[in-house]
Image (cartoon, helix red, strand yellow):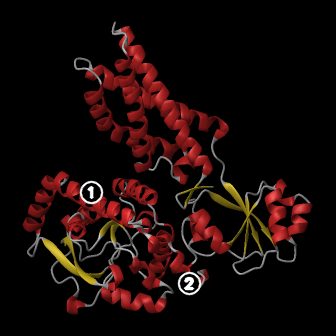
Amino acid sequence: MIKIFSHNVRSEVLKLCVLDASLMGLLVFALSAASRMESGITPGTMSDWVALAALALGMTLGASLTGGAAGLYQGRAVASMARALRAASISLLLLVPIAFLLVQLLLPAGRHGPALGVAMLGAIAALALSRLYLGLGSRPPLSRLALLGGVPMAAPAGAAIQQGQQPFEVALVLPLGERLADALRRGRLRAWRIWAVITPSGMAVPDTLRGQCNAAGLKLYSQSEFSEVGLAQVSIEDLPPGWLTSARAMHTSRIEAALRRGFDIALALGLLIFTLPLLLLTALAIRLESPGSIFYQQERVGLGHRPFMLLKFRSMVVDAEPGGVPRWASLGDSRVTRIGRFLRLSRIDEIPQALNVLRGEMSIVGPRPERPGFVATLRLSIPHYDARAVVKPGITGWAQVNYPYGASVEDARIKLAYDLYYVRRRSLFLDLLILLATVRVVLFQEGAR
């Protein structure tokens, strides 16, 4: 694992991303230059070579973004060739308009069509070569874990590993009666190619034993440490007293705060302007399908537990909650209209929340804003639930892109584990990863109800 701005990235996946980018840059540059030479247009001046280099660099950056948005570097896509092909196809489709703009801006008029084709050919060849490299046996293996004490991995960490959603597998269980030092000395862990040993939370581990593990090339984590480092979520029950005071979200500089606000305003305005025709069609469809208002306002809890009115397109029938008693949505909920079901699957119903962002009540990225009734219940059932209110709620967030729609107290507990990870390790880099993952969630309709 490699830490980038407080967020841990699997080193094998990062290497794959670098491999894709390197091949992309080299092939786009080489094929573009060769194509121009074959057409009798030799890049003779420095500006010609700079334009080709800028095209290659732009394609490389664009492919990295579209690959992340399509889930090309997710653990499941790296481990499965079928998933990798699907993600690569979507990534290339998303890359076409970026390549078109780059060709228009950087290359002289007259041969934009052939140049676009050559640039996309280079992108396809780069992804094909890197995936062929994986298919020939260089695929990053699942990192193998040893559990000390035979204690099952706590949910949701254990479930995520068992379902193949994380790049780890539990390969060995060591009983507490067998000392870890003995297993190290006999070479048992090396024989099983163990990457990390997971100890029960709260178990004291001597520094000498940690040193022996480091010397053997083994990572040693408690379950709570592994949840945060390996699975990007916190173990809520194991958070130490005063943990919130050291969270990155509590130490945002004025410069970062200004950047975040400017980013929120720019993205919210861009979202509203770009989707304006879609918003008008959506409003018309809602009006024609069922009586009632086009928009739906609902009280939610925001920064510092301050209430605000969240704005959405109406996706349910009028009076969906008789008596005003809050209810979680369920799969196949009969209250959802036909148009509303499509809006919820595509997340179009969430776009009006950009107005909440412009008003300063929400951010683009942050924990999902909850209703006061749910908050009153959940804060009594789940430790540290109030800590999610130290940042503005968001249209998308770390919990939203890692876990489906929550419809129970247990779901809320799992999503809080992701939300508090975001609070502890918030950075602009993590926000970028969340935005890219949001594209994947919308494209594949993950977790909507």
Q: Is residue 334 left or right of residue 194?
A: left
Query: For the image shown, how many numbered marks are present on the structure?
Result: 2
Q: Is residue 164 left or right of residue 114?
A: right
Q: Which image quadrant: the N terminus?
A: bottom right
Q: Residue at x 65, y 39 (%)?
A: 138
Q: Secondary structure at mark 1?
A: helix
- Taking the image as drawn, is residue 330 in sight? yes
Residue under label 2: 242
| 134 lies above or below 195 | above
Q: In the rendering, at what x and y percent does residue 311 appear?
A: 20, 73
Out of 108 and 275, give the one closest to the viewer: 108
Q: Residue at x 12, y 66 (%)?
A: 286
Residue under label 1: 267
Q: Which image quadrant: the C terminus?
A: bottom left
| 284 lies above or below 26 | below
Q: Look at discs 1 and 2 and give the one toward the viewer.
A: 2
Among the two numbered marks 1 and 2 on one chain, the one whose residue lies closer to the N terminus: 2
Q: Splitting the image into 4 quarters, where does residue 399 fall?
A: bottom left
Q: In the rendering, at what x and y percent does residue 263 appear?
A: 30, 58
- Taking the image as drawn, is residue 449 in sight? no
Out of 181 and 171, give the one closest to the viewer: 181
